[in-house]
Image (cartoon, rainbow, N blue to C red):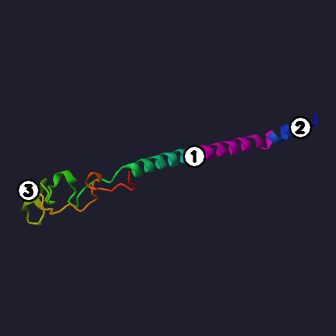
Amino acid sequence: MEWFWWILIFFWLGGFAKLAEVSRAALKTRHERRLERIEAQQSKQLALEEAQKPPEPICGCGHHLAKHDKQGKCHELIEVATAWDSDHKPVEYGREQCHCQQYVGPQPLSQIYAEPLTDL
């Protein structure tokens, strides 16, 4: 019957409330760390997927290589300011051909030729 008094004293001093608070904090920390691990796995998966993609052939003007001809001239239409207000801010825009002269990005693999490494 002596253990009964120890448990009763433990209740009076708020021991079980402290025990519940500590366990609740531990579960919260465990949950946060688990969410961090899941987020890290997702970001790792996205990074791996991005690494597997070939580079996009986009010119310095922002247009795709498909918009450029064999000489490198861009054939995309862009918006150009045609009228300005008194504060030198554009008021009207018109469409004009892009002035970019040459695509300088990565060449697609279809244009690269590699000789065979071994003779048949």
What's the mark number on residue 5?
2
> What's the residue at 34%, 51% (across, down)?
54
Q: Do residues under tags 3 and 1 come within 8 Å of each other at their CB atoms?
A: no
The disc label shown at residue 32, or none: 1
| Spatial separation of the CA atoms under disc 2 and disc 3 | 91 Å
Residue at the farthest front position: 120
Q: Amino acid at mark 3?
A: Glu
Q: Which quadrant of the figure has residue 31?
A: top right
* Earlier residue among tags 2 and 1: 2
Q: Is residue 71 magenta?
A: no
Magenta span: 11-33
Amino acid found under the numbered disc labelled 2: Trp
Could you classify mark 3 by the number of other residues whose Cα lies within 10 Å: few (under 14), some (14-19), or many (20 or more)?
few
| In this picture, residue 119 sits left or right of residue 85 | right
| Residue 81 image point, x, y percent | 10, 59
In the image, is residue 17 part of the stretch drawn in magenta? yes
Q: Please identify the quadrant where the N terminus is shown.
A: top right
